[in-house]
Image (spheres, helix red, strand yellow):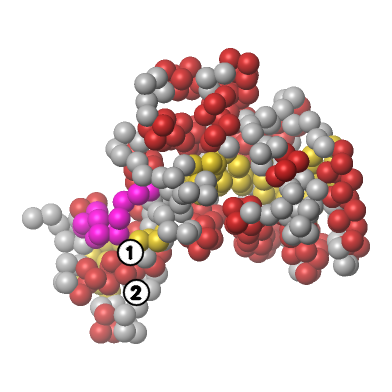
Amino acid sequence: MSLKKFFTKTTRQSIIKTKIVSKYFGTWAKVIIPSTKKRSNKIAYIDLFAGPGRYEDGIKSTPLLILEQAIADQNLRDMLVTIFNDKDKNYINSLKEEIDKLPDIEKLKHKPQVIKHQIGSGELFKIFENKNLIPILLFVDPWGYQGLSLRLISSVLKDWGCECIIFFNYNRINMGLSNPVVEGAMKAIFEERTEKLKNKLVDLSSKERELTITEEIFEALQEMGGEFVLPFCFKNASGKRTKHYLIFVSKHFKGYEIMKDIMAKESSNIAQGVPFFEYCSADNKQPLLFELNRPLDELGGMLLNEYAGKKLTMYDIYREHSVGKRYIKKNYKYILLQLEAEKKIKTIPPQHKRRINTFGDKVLINFPKRS
């Protein structure tokens, strides 16, 4: 599919991607605004590959949805700075026209900036690296991989309140790793890991190759400071092959928790109440992806083993244990209620002093020592 065809009409996948990004922006902004009022009194949304604003079938893309949220909210009207970039002149002109058509767009204190710039020259991350940034939600959605780099993500993520959502085109990157013509672009993504990764891929099956490449980018993002990394996998129409990932990167658990809930609701596959986020199967050769595929049946045993002899609240367990796993809060509450009913844990307050079948965030759990 060419870039021009990409914006011809919406697909189910493009709708889900747009929904995830726009939903997260709204929630992120509400969380970050109270603290930001005491600081710069500004937050920003930056889209480096913004497109024309609408698909040819008339459906709005992410920039317009973000601006509509801003227009509808007094805080965002006063505080939000938006920068929309694309290298395509026609897309830029179209986006400007679509923004100007939005009702009450003039109410925004900071006029949306729509610019034409070729991402990938290295100038952009140098600008970010040398500035103390206001809170930014950065969306990097290139067609392919040109413009995606670890250094760009790191240059934004370094500052308070800044988070990134990355479009990781697995198909194109998979082909690029064996193409010497685009070696520079691959090194921008994987940096010093590039040659080591290429060696790992020798003689691997297509499934092993995918898991190895995605595990590598997740580890690289964590090493550069993105402690909380969460991928959402998009497959082809048959559901058998991965096309790309939407990867969320944050330094803070709160952002991770919010995005996890959003991605869970958009997941097309749920087993035992645990969302798959369209993750592919993995084994213990890829520990990060392996943990993201553990079934609910294993959670109770994991908690009894890992927290033996300890006392923690439900929320402390969830915050500490859920990172890197696809379990969401309600999965922990369900399993802890089950362990409590089976008298495998003790709780304060106990079940008979709480509302029936509830397990509050502050309930204290006493795990027995290993026998």
- Looking at the image, is 81 positioned above or below residue 141? below
Location of residue 361 in the rendering, given as x and y in whole percent from the top left corner: 40, 69
* Residue 133 on image: x %, y %: 71, 42
Question: Pointer 1: what residue?
Answer: 272
Q: Is residue 307 visible?
A: no
Q: Does the magenta run of residues contain 298?
A: yes
State the residue at coordinates (64%, 46%). Answer: 162
Query: Which residues fall within the magenta stretch?
Result: 292-304
Q: Which residue, as the protein is rendered here, is positioned at the far front?
A: 238
Closer to us: mark 2 or mark 1?
Answer: 1
Q: 297 or 255: which is nearer to us?
A: 297
> Which one is in front, 330 or 158?
330
Please state the horizontal and vertical placement of residue 254, each as a whole percent of the image: 52, 57
Compared across the picture, whether 192 is left or right of 321 comes to right
Residue with the most extreme top position: 180
Q: Mark 1: give few (<14), some (14-19) or many (20+) Cα within 10 Å.
A: few
Q: Amino acid at mark 2?
A: Phe
Q: Main secondary structure of the magenta part?
A: helix
**Secondary structure type for disc 2:** loop
Q: Which residue is mark 2?
A: 359
**Which residue lies at the image location 17% right of the left edge and 67% below the top edge?**
344
Q: Is residue 174 above or below residue 34?
A: above
Label 2 Cα neighbours within 10 Å, binned few <14 / some 14-19 / many ≥20: many
| Left/right of residue 349 with respect to residue 86 in the rendered view | left
Q: Amino acid at mark 1?
A: Gln
Residue 338 in the image: state x and y as whole percent.
24, 71
Whichever of callouts 2 and 1 sits on the residue coming sooner in the sequence is 1
Q: How much space separates mark 2 and mark 1, taking CA atoms?
A: 18 Å
Residue 361 lies in the magenta-colored region: no
Name the image quarter holding residue 282: top left
